[in-house]
Amino acid sequence: MRKDVRILLVGEPKVGKTSLIMSLVSEEFPQVVPYRAEEITIPADVTPERVPTHIVDYSEAEQTDEQLSSEISKANVICIVYAVNNKKSIEKVTSHWIPLINDNTDKDSRVPVILVGNKSDLVEHSSMETILPVMNQYTEIETCVECSAKNLKNISELFYYAQKAVLHPTGPLYCPEEKQMKPACIKALTRIFKVSDLDNDGILNDNELNFFQRTCFNAPLVSQALEDVKNVVRKNVIDGVCDNGLTLKGFLFLHTLFIQRGRHETTWTVLRRFGYDDDLELHQDYLFPLTLKVPPDCTTELNHNAYLFLQSVFDKHDKDRDCALSPEELKDLFDVFPYMPWGPDVNNTVCTNDEGWITYQGYLSQWTLTTYLDVQRCLEYLGYLGYSIISEQESQAVAITVTRDKKIDLQKKQTQRSVFRCNVFGDSGSGKSGFLQAFLGRNLTRQNTVSEEHMSYYAISTAYVYGQEKYLLLHEVFPDFDVLSDTDLACDIVCLVYDASNPHSFEYCARVFKQYFMDTKTPCMMIAAKSDLQEAKQLYALTPLEFCRKHKMPPPQAFTCNTADAPCKDIYTKLTTMAMHPHARLRCMCTCNRCTFCHLQNFINSELVQTVKAKLYTAILSRHVTQADLKSSTFWLRVSAGATVFAVLGFAMYRVLLKQR
Ligand code: GDP
Ligand code: MG
C-alpha cells in the first residue's frame, strides 16, 4: 500500500481553490481567505482510505511558473478547479491546464486528474453538459464533481475521489475508449478465477464464491446477495452463469461493471489480496517473503500442510484420475504461472508412468527437489498457485520447514529430516546416469529412448526406511571438475560409481575418495556398475574390495540397470538408510550374506514374512483400495502405521538374532 497521497489544486484565480481547502478543514465557509493556503496534512486515521493525505494549494499571485511545474510533478493527483458560473475558467481547463500538466508529467505514468466545478450554489443548471465531452476526450481525467465551498456541498467527496484516484487508479484496469478492461487486468483476474476455482470445473459455485468473498472482503455473501449478483450477470451476459455458478466470462463481466460504476476499489481489493501491485504484477513481498532464514547445515523441506495443498492442486488437475499429469493437464496446472516452470528434464528427474507423464509421486518429488535446492523458487511457485490464500496462511513461507543443523542430528544420532542428498561421482561413461535413472524405475532399454538434451543431473524419488517414507535425491556430479564446490561436498552420502567392465574406471573413484572424502564423516558407497557385463580386473594398486576394506567402506555393490523389468531398488534403500544413520556401523550395510544384518535382511525378505506383512496390511486396510485412496493422506498414514508395526517387529527379531549370536 502507498505511504501517502499528495493532492494539488490548480485553476484560474478566484475560482475558489483556497476556499475549498479552508472549507474542508474548518467545516465552514471562510469569508476572507489568503491567496494561498498553507500545505496541510490530514492524518491517516481521519481519511476514508486511511493514508496520510497532503493538500497543496496554488496561487498565480504568489508562485512562479517553475514552482508550479515542480508542484505538478510532485503531485499524485491534480484537481483542476473551475467556477461553474465562469465560462472562461472552464475553457482554460482544456486550453491551458491539461496541456500544462501533460508537459510536466511522464507520458507513461500520467497523473490522474479530477475536474472540480466550484460555486454550484450560484447557478441553477449544471456544467456537466460542457464537461462530459472533455472527460471523454482526456483519459487521464479520472472523474468530475460539482461542489460549493460556500454550502459545503460535495467537499469531502471531492477529496475522497482524489484519494481514491491515487489509491485505486482506473488507468491500469480499464480502457475508457474501448469501454473494457485492459489485457493485463483480464489476465490477472483470469488467474484469480483459476486459483479460486478449487475443483477446476470452470465455474465458481456457491462454496467457492463464498470462500472468495471471505478471503477478499472478510465476509461471506448472504445467499440473497449471491443470487442478486448471479441475476445481474444472467441478465447481461450469455453463459455468464452456468450450473448456478459464475463462469470466467461472468466473473470478468462483474468486474467490468464494478469499474464502470466507479467501484474500482472492489476490483483493486481482489487484485491486491491475490498479491498484485499497482502495475498488476505479482508483488515481490508476496512471491518472496523475507521471513525465511536458512542457516548453513540446515535444509529446506515442505511441511505436511504444503504437501496437502500440493496434493489438492494435483487432484484438481488430474481430470482423468489416472494419477499422472498428461501434457494438457500439466499445462493447465501451470496456467496460473507467468511461464512454464518445468522443462522436459523434469520428466527425467522424477518418476513417470509408461507414457512418460509425471506421476503423483513424481510430482511431489519434483516439488521436494525444488524446495531442497532453491527454496526461493519454491516460494515463488507456491505464490503463483495461491498457496497462502487458499490455505489461509500469512505467507508462502509457512509452507517451509527449515531442518535443524545437521551437526546436532549427528550428535543426537537421529534426524527428523525427510530428504537426503546423495552425490554420485564417477568417471565419464562409468554408468552414473544409468544409476540415477534406475532409481526412477527405468531399465537400459527405456533409458535409451531419452534424448540427450532432456537428461537431468538429478533424480529424486522415495525410499522406505524402517517403514518411513523418505526422499532420496541423487545428484550426478560432472566428472571434469577442477575443484568441488561446497554443495558438491555437502551431502548426506556419497556414491562412487565405476564401470566394472572397464579396467580404467576404478582409479577415478579411488582418487576422488582420497582427495575429498577420506577425512570426512560423510558415508561413502562404492558401486560396481554394469555388473551384467564381463568383469574386468581394475588397474589399481588395490582391488575395489581391498580398497573398501582398507577405508572401512561397505564392499562394492554390484549394480546393473540392464534388466528386463525395472531395476532392483534395494541399493537406494540402503543408501537412504546410510544417509539417515551415518553413525551406524557401515559393515552392516553389506550384502555378504554372513553378518547379522544380512541374515535379518534375508529374513525380512523371506516369503513367510512377506505373507505376514501382506496379511497385516490387508488387515489394516481391510477394504478395497482404489486409485483415489492411494493418493489420500489417511491412506498413507494407515500404511505407514502398518509399516511401523512391521518395523518394530523386525527390530525385535533383529535383537533376538543378535542375542543368539
Ligand atoms: P482562489 O483564487 O481560487 O483560491 O479562490 P478563493 O478561494 O480566493 O475564492 C475567490 C472568491 O470566490 C472568494 O471571494 C470566495 O469567497 C468566493 N468563493 C469561493 N468558493 C465559493 C463558493 O463555493 N460559492 C460562492 N458563492 N463563492 C465562493
Ligand atoms: Mg487562492
Image: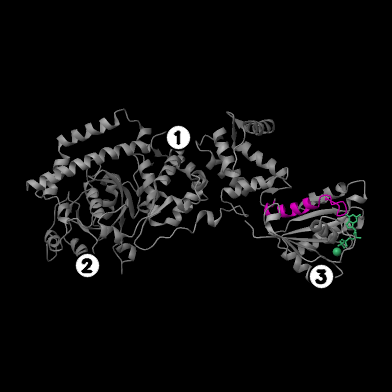
- Alpha carbons under labels 1 and 2: distance apart: 52 Å
Q: Is residue 20 above or below residue 194?
A: below
Ranked by sequence position, the earlier of labels 1 and 2 is 1
Left or right, 398 with respect to 219, comes to left
Q: Nearer the viewer, mark 1 or mark 2?
A: 2
Label 3 close to label 1 by CB (< 8 Å): no
Q: Quadrant of residue 429?
A: bottom left
- Residue at (67% x, 30% y) in the render: 231
- Which residue is labeled 3 in the image? 65
* Residue to which mark 2 is pinned: 519
Dot 2: element: loop
Pointer 1 residue: 319
Of helix, strand and loop, which one carries label 1?
loop
Picture quadrant of ligand 1: bottom right
Mark 3 or 1: the one toward you: 3
x and y, in percent, of residue 392 in the image: 50, 45
Examine the rendered structure and indicate whether residue 56 appears above or below residue 417: below
Which quadrant holds the N terminus?
bottom right
Spatial CA span between label 3 and label 2: 77 Å
Verify CB contact (< 8 Å) between mark 3 and mark 2.
no
Q: Position of residue 476 (x, y in %)?
A: 30, 57
